[in-house]
Amino acid sequence: MSLIPATILTGFLGSGKTTLLKRVLSEAHGQKIAVVENEFGEENIDNEILVADTTENIIQMSNGCICCTIRDDLRATLQDLAEKKRKGELDFERVVIETTGLADPGPVAQTFFMDDEIAEQYLLDSVLTLVDAKHAAEQLNERQEARRQVGFADQIFISKSDLVSEDELSALTHRLKHMNPRAPMRPVHFGEVALKEVFDLRGFNLNAKLDIDPDFLKVDDHDHGHEHHDHAHGEHCNHPSHQHGHEGHGHHHHHDDDVKSFVYRATRPFVPEKLEDFLGAIVQVYGPRMLRYKGVLHMEGTDRKVIFQGVHQLMGSDLGPVWAEGEQRTSKMVFIGIDLPKDILVQGLDQSLA
């Protein structure tokens, strides 16, 4: 049986997850989708798009989709759904998990890798994060959950962008890019998103061919000669999205996000054993703070690119395509995490090069 693709939908309270879900569920797209909701979500899926309430926690939708709330834990719910699908009791092609607005998507994502039974039945496709343009600056300043949701994202949808000025939207986009440069982002209105932008993004395949975004971390214009490149917001950053002025105080408080990303590049190849030892040691210590990390690596001993990515303490790698004739063999890695020790990472990676 082929694996059932799963999508995690996350975003802070009021960011528009339910609006997006309703659209996905009520649209006549011909796909049968099972939605798993955290039962203490802000708002349940409206009854008008449901056919009938049953005694079970699984409800059939008018367009053939199904919806269920998590009574116990996610793992049990996913196993229950897969078993019903196997027996022919339920018909669905994919699963969308809507997390509560205060959730850290990390543990939800880890379920797909740590649990063998789940890993044999499901394939985690991507984490989609909705960001509310109107309230994002405040939420990102005040709530670590909101920052983590951004750090985890494979795709970011910015909702309510019509309620803010172009400058505010640009400042928010700038800030989000520094927190997570690997997630494409775009404004959405009232959940109007084409399904091809929601499903089959392949953002999370730990062991499959990963296409790295062609613009994957373009080097800034002023930085062509360096082996490493990064730009992290420090406490001196005065970008508009980081400032919240206090009326009457005559000063700005510059907010420094704890979720940051940095990029590592190297032209010399990695020695596989050294790199493996170093990364293994790093995830032991910093794993809980490492949200997502991903890269295309130039390794000794192979003519193929090595694609790797990880979530917290779990990482995997796979052989990608052969380096093209004349293509510069460069390793590019991005690390997204909470207060990661960049100097230690850079030093260890440098020491893993041939």
Image (cartoon, rainbow, N blue to C red):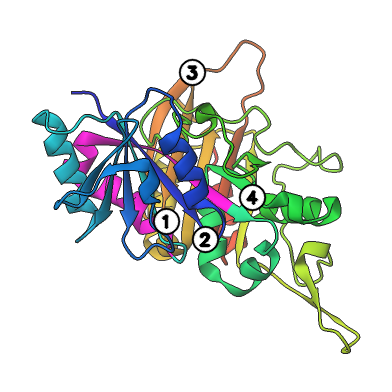
* Tag nearer the camera, 1 or 3: 1
The residue lying at 64 percent from left, 48 percent from top is: 158
* Tag nearer the camera, 2 or 3: 2
Q: Residues within 10 Å of mark 2 (few under 14, many from 20)?
A: many
| One can see residue 302 in this view | no
Q: CA distance from mark 1 to mark 3?
A: 30 Å
The residue lying at 44 percent from left, 52 percent from top is: 278
Residue at the disc numbered 3: 321
Classify the position of the C terminus by image quarter. top right
Question: What's the magenta region?
Answer: 103-130
Residue 55, percent from left and from top: 14, 53
Q: CA distance from mark 2 to mark 3?
A: 32 Å
* Residue nearer the viewer, 89 or 203: 89
Residue 183, percent from left and from top: 59, 42
The reply to whether discs 2 and 1 touch (Cβ–Cβ < 8 Å) is yes
Rendered image quadrant of residue 78: top left
Mark drawn on residue 271: none
* Residue nearer the viewer, 184 or 113: 184
Q: CA distance from mark 4 to mark 3?
A: 36 Å
Instruction: Report the amino acid beneath label 1.
Output: Pro
Residue at the disc numbered 4: 159
Residue at the disc numbered 2: 148
The reply to whether discs 1 and 3 touch (Cβ–Cβ < 8 Å) is no
Query: In this picture, is 15 found above or below 250?
Result: above
* Tag nearer the camera, 4 or 3: 4
Q: Is residue 255 magenta?
A: no
Residue at the disc numbered 1: 105
Q: Earlier in the sequence, mark 2 or mark 3?
A: 2
